[in-house]
Image: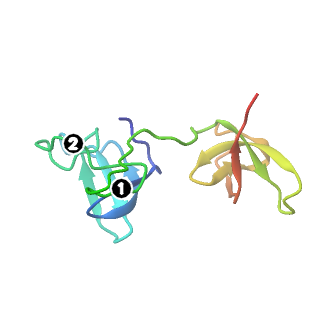
């Protein structure tokens, strides 16, 4: 599994967190996740807490060990993917380039043209 900086992930012990680094310099534990409890925890590149774990713990959906729901396949958008967002009046769609979470780059620019982003309430995948 490939985790990226700013991916929102879930762990059954720590809850929700955000990937802060994917190149942490400790052998076998390159993924750093900052959880809502302000704990920074390292994971293996495939989302395991220990090299001895059989299964990964990092998921893109909330789960528990009784009912399941684990998902380490990122179902969302990729950086610079074309999306539609609703304008402030909710009456018109605007074409934008996705950045992360619910942010898109400003004024229809992509990451090569700007690093400024705007938060949107409604983001939908662009269908050709």
The residue carrying mark 2 is 55
Q: Tell me if label 1 and label 2 are in contact, CB under 8 Å.
A: no
Residue, far front? 67
Judged by depth in the image, the label closer to the viewer, 1 or 2, is: 1
Q: Which residue is the extreme one toward the top?
A: 128
Front one among 1 and 111: 1
Q: Is residue 45 above or below residue 57?
A: above
- Left or right of 34? Residue 13 is left
Which numbered disc covers residue 14? none
Q: Residue at x 46, y 40 (%)?
A: 74
Residue drawn at x 35%, y 35% is 1
Q: Residues within 10 Å of mark 2 (few under 14, many from 20)?
A: few
Q: Residues within 10 Å of mark 1 (few under 14, many from 20)?
A: some
Label whose residue precedes the other's in the sequence (1 or 2): 2
- Kindly report the distance in space between the C-alpha atoms of the residues bearing marks 1 and 2: 13 Å
Residue placed farthest to the left in the image?
Answer: 52
Q: Is residue 29 above or below residue 66?
A: above
Q: How many marks?
A: 2
> The residue tagged with tag 1: helix, strand or loop?
loop
Most distant residue in the bottom direction: 37
Q: Does 79 sit left or right of 125 as displayed?
A: left
**Residue drawn at (76%, 27%), measured in percent from left and top?**
128
Relative side of 82 to 54, left or right: right
Residue 26: name its quadrant. top left
x%, y% of residue 33?
A: 34, 55
The residue lying at 38 percent from left, 36 percent from top is: 2
Q: Which residue is mark 1?
A: 63
Please tell me in which quadrant of the rendered image residue 89 appears.
bottom right
Q: Is residue 109 left or right of residue 12?
A: right
On the image, the x and y values in percent for residue 104 come to 67, 49
- Say what secondary structure mark 2 lies in: loop
């Amino acid at each position: 599994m490939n985790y990226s900086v700013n991916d929102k992930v879930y762990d059954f012990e720590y809850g929700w967190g955000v990937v802060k680094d994917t190149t942490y310099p400790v052998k076998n534990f390159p993924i750093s996740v900052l959880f809502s409890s302000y704990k920074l925890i390292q994971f293996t590149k495939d989302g395991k807490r220990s090299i001895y774990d059989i299964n990964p713990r990092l998921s893109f959906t909330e789960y528990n060990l009784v009912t399941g729901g684990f998902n380490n396949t990122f179902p969302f958008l990729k950086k610079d993917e074309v999306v539609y967002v609703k304008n402030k009046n909710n009456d018109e769609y605007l074409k934008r380039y996705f950045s992360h979470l619910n942010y898109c780059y400003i004024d229809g620019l992509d990451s090569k043209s700007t690093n400024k982003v705007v938060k949107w309430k409604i983001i939908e995948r662009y269908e050709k």
